[in-house]
Amino acid sequence: MAIKTEIIDEVKADNSSQIEAKRQELENNYENFQQDLKTQQESILKSYQSQADQKREQIISRAILNKKNKRRSKLNECLANFITELEQRLADFTSDQDYYLFIFNSIKNSASALPDNRFKIWLRKADQNLLDDLKNLLELEMKDYEFELSVSDRVKSGGFIIETCSNQQLIENTFAALIDSYKEEIAIELKNHILE
């Protein structure tokens, strides 16, 4: 009986030890699972936070770009309107007597600035009637220079093109070239004084 009790006690102790070991193992597994779960949750939250930050930056960048595009579009519209009005005023100017003097003085200035004394000058077709008078006046005022004047499709809006007969240098003093050369400056002025 005593041996039986001792064996039962030993089996109970062994079972208790095994149960305790199993309980400890399950507790450790549960703690590890909880820690893994917490790590995964933190990782997912960080990922979502990162995606949210990235999405926010994209939205802000898109909004800034849209605002810039709208401003540039408005600037382009103002610039186009300004240039259209400027072209109309220049077209009106070409029918004025001062246009003839402008052409004459501009040709004189251009010829004086170029390193030659023989020039080809092209005017627009609408200025055909100015050719003879302009040539006579230039030869009278600038006796040491020779001028060959004609019309060309290259000059559409008014002004002229002058080229040295040696074909080394050319100055395009047309209204279209003049407007193009100042287009960016006009845009900057419009932006600074109108759209700000």
Image: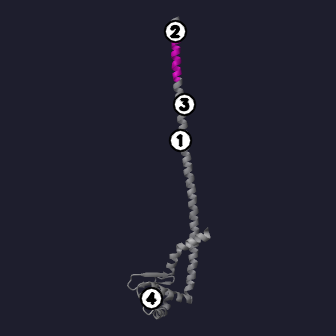
Nearer mark to the viewer, of 4 and 1: 1
User: Going from the N terminus, do you reach mark 1 or mark 2 first?
Assistant: 2
Give the structural element (helix, strand or loop) at label 3: helix
Q: Is residue 126 visible?
A: no
**Location of mark 2 (residue):** 6
Q: Amino acid at mark 1?
A: Ser
User: Going from the N terminus, do you reach mark 2 or mark 4 first?
Assistant: 2
**Location of mark 3 (residue):** 31
The residue segment tinted magenta is: 5-22
Mark 1 is surrounded, within 10 Å at the Cα level, by few (under 14), some (14 to 19) or many (20 or more) other residues, namely few
Q: Amino acid at mark 3?
A: Glu
- Residue 95 percent across, percent down from the top left: 56, 87
Q: CA distance from mark 1 to mark 3?
A: 18 Å
Badge 3 vs badge 4, beta-carbon distance below 8 Å:
no
Nearer mark to the viewer, of 3 and 4: 3
**Location of mark 4 (residue):** 150
